[in-house]
């Protein structure tokens, strides 16, 4: 099959979160299964800087734009699939984050920028000659690509897939944006892209695609409820016969403690010494006081409400007073960033905080930590808990979304039959988080139980094998 993925991020060209990992590793897994796969992303300045090879393969004239839009071609790391970058200076050639300006606000022209990405995807479908290639399947990811499906002519023979990685980001803009984008008036409707008198990009993907997927079975259920439906639960329930949860996989070429180029010592399930060596080396690097009898706790993630970092902040002083060492890597809400730094200053040698984006350190935390924390309020899938388990780092997670689907909780029964891979909690309070962490420490103190937890996580298959096939089955399922 010829498959075109369209997204606002793909690793290693541009990444702010798990979307980038998935939009690189899923296409590569599909290519490995013998399919012809391309990925279309914006040519942000930062992405262009990462290109090792590139050529311009087309210049597309879109009505209403003063200049042509160039398409640059490069390859994914293992050369399994091609990456096309939409190069239009006024939209993408600027410093900083793909979505936010340097005051942390969405770029004023986000609607126009991502609408351009959508228009290019549609042009590729409508006109095979443009890039001498036309997909059988167009697979769009998140709101930035939501306007692809509504713009595709009805007579086009292409399967339209829309994957929701995070329903809380919807791409909502005022009516005036709808008008200035030049959209057909009939799209301004309840069964179009109108939402509470505004324009919604994500609605376009949900209403007009053949299949809607999300990144875990539990999240697929949760988004049909008022708790996590972000106002779209009614629409999603309406389309529930076309809504499927397919769990993300992880890319073992990038995340494997036995080959990871970013970590100091390699290890695997039959030779775990390297894990302790990483802990020792990293604690020294991060100026944390060494105490082998205490587990090292790690957190990596966007510092936003979704990730429950506020809960961790509330719990930290008490946990640090117990002498547990913590390492936190993340960036996001400046208020949360400051709070973390303040706590770190008050607890030297106990809490190391690094504000920023640091790929290398994120791997080192997975390798060095004993326990990885993900107290998310909601989590469509979550990749870090899977990286953790693969690295023998036991996750403590809230029981939501993909976390509930991937972590086998340490109940007495699961511990007895050695299937447990982590600890979960349901009530979202700092006290419950603290209690769960104490339970984790108790298990850590019991060497045999702990080893069983680590090994159960390490033996789990988190690869894309199964999920890549599930997507292919969906592409082939009766689509209309
Ligand atoms: P989300 O996509 O909601 O951010 P995921 O768990 O799916 O959450 O994926 C997050 C990805 O982004 C992981 O690969 C994680 O290591 C990475 N990541 C998040 N924050 C940082 C950071 N500050 N530095 C390096 N990597 C980060
Ligand atoms: C989103 C979600 C995260 C998921 C990732 C990749 O950013 O927040 O849970 O793992 O997308 O699908």
Image (cartoon, rainbow, N blue to C red):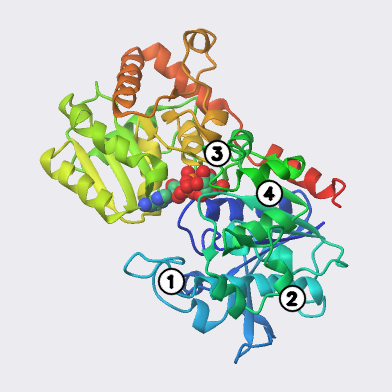
**Cα distance, mark 4 to mark 1?**
33 Å
Look at the image and tell me whether residue 54 can be seen.
no
Point out which mark residue 226 bears. 3
As drawn, 262 above or below 280: below
Query: Foreground: 153 or 230?
Result: 230
Where residue 213 appears, as percent x and y from the top left, is 68, 46
Q: Which residue is mark 4?
A: 29
Where residue 16 appears, as percent x and y from the top left, is 45, 57
Look at the image and tell me whether residue 246 can be seen.
yes
As drawn, 163 above or below 465: below
The secondary structure type at the circle numbered 3 is loop
Q: Which residue is mark 2?
A: 123
Q: Which residue is mark 1?
A: 107
Q: Between tags 4 and 1, which lies in front?
A: 1
Q: Between tags 3 and 4, which lies in front?
A: 3
**Cα distance, mark 3 to mark 2?**
37 Å
Q: Furthest-bottom residue in view? A: 66
| The residue carrying mark 4 has its beta carbon less than 8 Å from ligand 2 | no
Where residue 57 appears, as percent x and y from the top left, is 69, 81
Q: Quadrant of residue 396?
A: top left
Q: Are marks 2 and 1 in contact (CB under 8 Å)?
A: no
The secondary structure type at the circle numbered 1 is loop
As drawn, 436 above or below 151: above
Q: Residue at x 74, y 41 (%)?
A: 470
Q: Residue at x 54, y 16 (%)?
A: 419
**Cα distance, mark 2 to mark 1?**
25 Å
**Cα distance, mark 1 to mark 3?**
29 Å
Query: Which is nearer the N-term, disc 1 or disc 3?
Result: 1
Query: Which is nearer the N-term, disc 4 or disc 1?
Result: 4
Q: Between tags 1 and 3, which lies in front?
A: 3
């Amino acid at each position: 099959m010829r498959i075109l993925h369209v997204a606002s991020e793909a690793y290693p060209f541009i990444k702010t979160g798990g979307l980038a990992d998935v939009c690189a590793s899923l296409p590569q897994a599909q290519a490995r299964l013998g399919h012809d796969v391309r990925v279309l992303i914006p040519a942000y300045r930062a992405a262009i800087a990462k290109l090792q090879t590139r050529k311009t393969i087309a210049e597309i004239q879109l009505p209403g734009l003063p200049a042509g839009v160039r398409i640059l071609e490069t390859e994914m790391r293992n050369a399994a699939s091609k990456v096309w970058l939409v190069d239009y200076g006024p939209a993408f050639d600027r410093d900083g984050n793909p979505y936010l300006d340097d005051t942390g606000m969405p770029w004023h022209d986000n609607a126009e920028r991502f609408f351009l990405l959508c228009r290019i995807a549609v042009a590729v479908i409508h006109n095979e000659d443009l890039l001498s290639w036309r997909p059988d399947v167009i697979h769009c990811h998140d709101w930035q690509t939501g306007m692809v499906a509504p713009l595709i002519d009805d007579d086009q023979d292409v399967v339209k897939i829309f994957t929701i990685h995070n329903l809380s980001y919807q791409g909502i803009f005022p009516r005036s944006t709808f008008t200035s984008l030049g959209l057909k008036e009939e799209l301004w409707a309840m069964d179009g892209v109108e939402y509470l008198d505004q324009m919604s990009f994500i609605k376009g993907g949900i209403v007009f695609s053949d299949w809607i997927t999300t990144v875990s079975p539990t999240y697929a259920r949760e988004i049909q409820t008022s708790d996590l439906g972000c106002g779209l639960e009614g629409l999603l329930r309406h389309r529930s016969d076309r809504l499927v949860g397919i769990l993300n996989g992880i890319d073992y070429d990038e995340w494997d403690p036995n080959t990871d180029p970013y970590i100091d010592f390699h290890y695997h399930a039959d030779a775990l010494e390297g894990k302790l060596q990483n802990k020792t080396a990293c604690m020294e690097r991060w100026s944390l006081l060494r105490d082998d009898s205490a587990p090292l706790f790690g957190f990596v993630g966007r510092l936003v409400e979704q990730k429950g970092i506020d809960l961790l902040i509330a719990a930290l002083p008490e946990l640090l007073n117990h002498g547990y060492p913590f390492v936190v890597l993340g960036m996001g809400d400046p208020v949360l960033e400051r709070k973390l730094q303040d706590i770190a200053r008050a607890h030297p040698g106990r809490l190391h905080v690094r504000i920023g984006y640091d790929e290398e350190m994120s791997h080192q935390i997975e390798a060095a930590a004993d326990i990885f924390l993900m107290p998310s309020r909601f989590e469509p899938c979550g990749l870090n808990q899977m990286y953790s388990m693969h690295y023998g780092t036991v996750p403590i997670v809230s029981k939501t979304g993909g976390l509930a689907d991937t972590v086998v909780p340490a109940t007495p029964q699961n511990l007895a039959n050695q299937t447990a891979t982590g600890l979960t909690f349901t009530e979202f309070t700092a006290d419950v988080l603290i209690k769960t962490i104490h339970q984790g420490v108790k298990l850590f103190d019991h060497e045999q139980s702990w080893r069983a937890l680590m090994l159960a996580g390490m033996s789990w298959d988190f690869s894309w094998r199964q999920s890549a096939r599930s997507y292919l089955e969906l592409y082939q399922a009766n689509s209309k």
